[in-house]
Image (cartoon, helix red, strand yellow):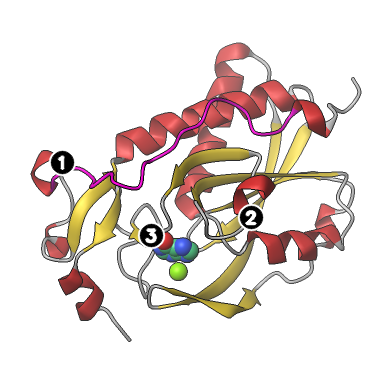
Amino acid sequence: RPFPSSSTLCHRGPPRTIKDDWPGYSLDLFTYPEHYHDDIESIYIPHGVIMNRTERLAHYIMDDFRDDNIMVLCVLKGGYKFCADLVEFIKILGRNSNKYLETRVEFIRLKSYLNDQSTEDLHIIGCRDLSFLRGKVCAIVDTGKTMKALLKHVETFEPKMVKVAGLLVKRLANMAESLTDYVGFEIPNRFVVGYALDYNEYFRDLNHICVLSRTGKMKYKI
Ligand code: HPA
Ligand code: MG
């Protein structure tokens, strides 16, 4: 079966946009780790919503790739939850439809944020040599902004096709959306934490995506 052309694959599904004035849910409505009680202002995207949206993205990916195999390149650290859950949903869908997508996973680590500010220098930590991608299909799983630089790096290894899945794409921030084929949520350009996204290494252990409070920003600032 020939490879699907990229024009049939891009930007699946209707917009899943979170509006600029969305305040998030009150903390009283959901459970979260007690130790972050004063540090988060609101629950921006509850864990259950993240999971269901991720399941939907897995459907799109299964439809697009059918009988192929994919090499997933997970961008650490912030992408580890999304990557794990997305791959899990792909496996479940395969099991339920008896149409398995052969999936392998590799990891790369990027760092570009200091406190809640994006910095110009992108550090690729760990696996710099991506030659295992040559001629493979890969879905880069990331949460946004560093995508452009990473894609440039990945393309030097000449993969057969590259598709990007991102849980969050920030409006205005950059051109990340046009680079992201499977978008979880388009959100306003604001700093969020949780579901593996950190603020100076804290909040990765929060299941929901949340907005920091002023207290939280001060407490964990470096
Ligand atoms: N939160 C945490 N890490 C990030 C973000 C964010 O909003 N954007 C890019 N890296
Ligand atoms: Mg970070």
Q: Position of residue 93 (x, y in %)?
A: 56, 21
Q: Is residue 148 left or right of residue 4?
A: left
Is residue 206 visible in the rendered image? The answer is no
User: Tag 1: Cα neighbours inside 10 Å, few (<14), some, or many (≥20)?
Assistant: few
> SS for tag 1?
loop
Residue beneath disc 2: 175
Earlier residue among tags 1 and 3: 1
Is residue 5 visible in the rendered image? The answer is yes
* Residue 132 lies in the magenta stretch: no
The image quadrant that residue 217 belongs to is bottom left
Quote the CA–CA distance across marks 1 and 3.
Answer: 22 Å
Quote the CA–CA distance across marks 2 and 3.
Answer: 16 Å
User: Tag 2: Cα neighbours inside 10 Å, few (<14), some, or many (≥20)?
Assistant: some
User: Tag 3: Cα neighbours inside 10 Å, few (<14), some, or many (≥20)?
Assistant: few
Q: Which residues are magenta?
A: 9-26
Q: Nearer the viewer, mark 1 or mark 2?
A: 2
Quote the CA–CA distance across marks 1 and 2.
Answer: 33 Å
> SS for tag 2?
loop
Residue beneath disc 1: 30
For the residue marked with disc 1, what is the amino acid? Phe
Rendered position, 123 above or below 202: below
Q: Quadrant of the N terminus?
A: top right
Q: Main secondary structure of the magenta part?
A: loop
Q: Position of residue 122 (x, y in %)?
A: 62, 76
Rendered position, 68 above or below 204: above
For the residue marked with disc 2, what is the amino acid? Met
Residue beneath disc 3: 190
For the residue marked with disc 3, what is the amino acid? Arg
Judged from the image, the quadrant occupied by ligand 2 is: bottom left
Q: Position of residue 62 (x, y in %)?
A: 65, 25
